Amino acid sequence: MYPSSPLQAPLWSAVASLTHARRMLEVGCGHGYTSAVMASSGGPDCLVETVEADQVHADLAQEAFLHRGLAKRVHVLRGRGQTILPKLKGKYDVVFLDGDWREYPRYLPQLRRLTRPGSIVVTANLSPLFGGWGGRLPGKRAIQSYLSRLVGDPSFRTYIIPSDWHAISVRL
């Protein structure tokens, strides 16, 4: 697990404000830091659903949400993104992909289905494509496939943040 930098926390306030977020989705919960920041940024009426395949991480995150008073607004969905996303219903204002990048190419049809015009998708973990983490991690082809399909998808407009190797996409 590679925890998000605290320097990224202001991103969620901006994204929540731009979308008037009431419903957010995260794929790759880890220990729940970003989910908690997302829920706090969205305000008291915002619901965050976060997907986590690792049961220990899911348990730790759920405990942290309870401790922070966020348990009613942040729900942990246990399982892999590729299994959970097809089962989700409704539209999300914000989607954050921060999980197993090897699954990202399978997410694109779900991202179109689960977002509305004006929704924002933030994609993390693009570093292996650009030599990040010493280039030792697998998944470069999956990220290349996902990113080229996302950039070419007429449903989205995408900007890649070079220093952080995230992509921010707006649903058209």
Image (spheres, rainbow, N blue to C red):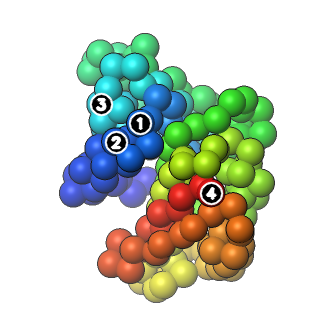
On screen, residue 43 versus residue 149, left or right, reads left
Query: In the image shown, does 1 or 33 lie closer to the viewer?
Result: 33
On screen, residue 41 versus residue 154, left or right, reads left
The residue located at (46%, 74%) in the rendering is 160
Dot 1: few (<14), some (14–19), or many (≥20) neighbours within 10 Å? some
Position of 4 relative to 166 (above/below) = above
Mark 1, residue position: 20
Query: In the drawing, what numbered circle is on residue 40?
Result: 3
The image quadrant of residue 63 is top left
Viewer-nearest of labels 4 and 3? 4
Task: Name which of mark 1 and mark 3 comes first in the sequence.
Answer: 1
Q: CA distance from mark 4 to mark 2?
A: 18 Å
User: Mark 3 belongs to which amino acid?
Assistant: Ser
Query: In the image shown, does 100 or 92 lie closer to the viewer?
Result: 92
Query: In the drawing, what numbered circle is on residue 17?
Result: 2
Viewer-nearest of labels 1 and 3? 1
The residue located at (62%, 31%) in the rendering is 78
Residue 113 location in percent, x, y?
74, 45
Q: CA distance from mark 1 to mark 3?
A: 13 Å
Name the secondary structure under disc 1: loop
User: Mark 4 belongs to which amino acid?
Assistant: Leu
Q: CA distance from mark 1 to mark 4?
A: 16 Å
Query: In the image shown, does 83 or 54 lie closer to the viewer?
Result: 83
Mark 4, residue position: 172
Q: Are marks 2 and 1 in contact (CB under 8 Å)?
A: yes
